[in-house]
Amino acid sequence: IESPMATAVPFIILSPVTQDETASVGGMVTLTCRVAASDNSSLQWSNTAQQTLYFGEKRALRDNRIQLNRSTGTELSITIGNVQLSDEGEYTCSIFTMPVRTARATVTVLGVPDKPQISGYEDTVQEGGKVTLTCTSSGSKPPAKLRWYRNQEELTGRPDVVETNPDEATYTVISELTLTVGRSDDNTLIGCAVDHPSLSPGEKWTEQPIRVLFTPDVTIQPQNDLPREGEKFIIQCIGNGNPKPTSYVWQKKDGELPLMAKVDASFLLFEMLNKSDNGVYLCQADNGIGKMQGEYTLLVQDPTAMSTSSGVDHAVIGGVVAVIVFILLCLLIVLGRYLIRHKGTYLTHEAKGCDDAPDADTAIINAEGGHSGAEDKKEYFI
């Protein structure tokens, strides 16, 4: 018979278990070491230089950044605050059994990139010209990626140039963008954003507004749409450019300006319109970058001419009146048909006697009931 003492007791191998961690410079990292069961052996954390940080609940290294998080028979957890690049490396967890067993955890420290800086833009650029912008960001680890944007639309710049910072294990990243600008790019925001694991999307971003100089677009705006003979009339030359036009020149195509027309900068004033003023008027606007010209055809109307808006109002009123007249006619027609169908003719016996009498005397006798056996009065309806 086998003795109970001969039964094998399972032996638990108390091997510690850890996991790798990642933190950003200035952040916090938690190192946790666990064993499956407790045999009253102590757990210990050591740093990359094999200096003991904690032995159970006891602090071994005087570094206030390192704090005890949790200590039990099966777990030893510590935190490292305000993490620096020098904290990167392998950390060791040991359990003092016979023999001593260890596990390692690698701490990766991310270098946080600085806010990007845009250079290369001086003041303004003329339409059709080129501008080259440079975006720079330092302090990243691993190297960051730079992205260009124009009003939220991503642009493609030259490949990033990565430089190693000699004093620390971080990198400086440089990117260039060249644009050929047009008038639509005036006041456009060119942005550079940093893409890095230590940052949330769009966390670090810089924008540079672009000012583009361009020749003016010219339009001529009349005071009203119906210039009438004998009235005062004004037309204005509007130049949209950067910078704004400072000089305006008025001309009449195929002739001289009328004697009664006065030039006041961007305005041309007619004190009293005449049909001889008819023609094409030209305005040239100059903003120092270039000159552009617009034109307006003046056609003077008779004094009795109605304005377009008045004509529209009369048309509306006429249409309403026509509808009302049509409705009334329809009602009259319906009413007439109704009366015709329900019209009655009232005939009495006396009236019938008058119709049958050959002369007036006989009619009177018949009306007074002179006939024997006369029937009672009857009413006839047709």
Image (spheres, rainbow, N blue to C red):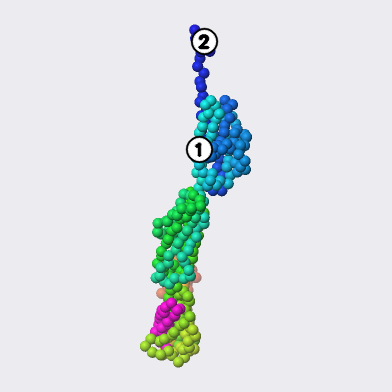
Q: Secondary structure at mark 2?
A: loop
What kind of residue is marked 2? Ser
- Residue drawn at (53%, 34%), measured in percent from left and top? 93
Residue 276 versus residue 14 in the image, above or below: below
Q: Quadrant of residue 339?
A: bottom left
List the residue tagged with mark 1.
105
Q: Secondary structure at mark 1?
A: strand
Q: In the rendering, at what x and y percent does residue 3 appear? A: 52, 10
What kind of residue is marked 1? Ala
Q: How many marks?
A: 2
Q: Quadrant of residue 59?
A: top right
- The residues colored magenta run 277-297
Q: In the rendering, at what x and y percent does residue 293 appear? A: 40, 80
List the residue tagged with mark 2.
3
Residue 140 versus residue 266 in the image, above or below: above
Categorize mark 1 by other alpha carbons within 10 Å: few (<14), some (14-19), many (20+). many
Q: Nearer the viewer, residue 179 or 267?
A: 179
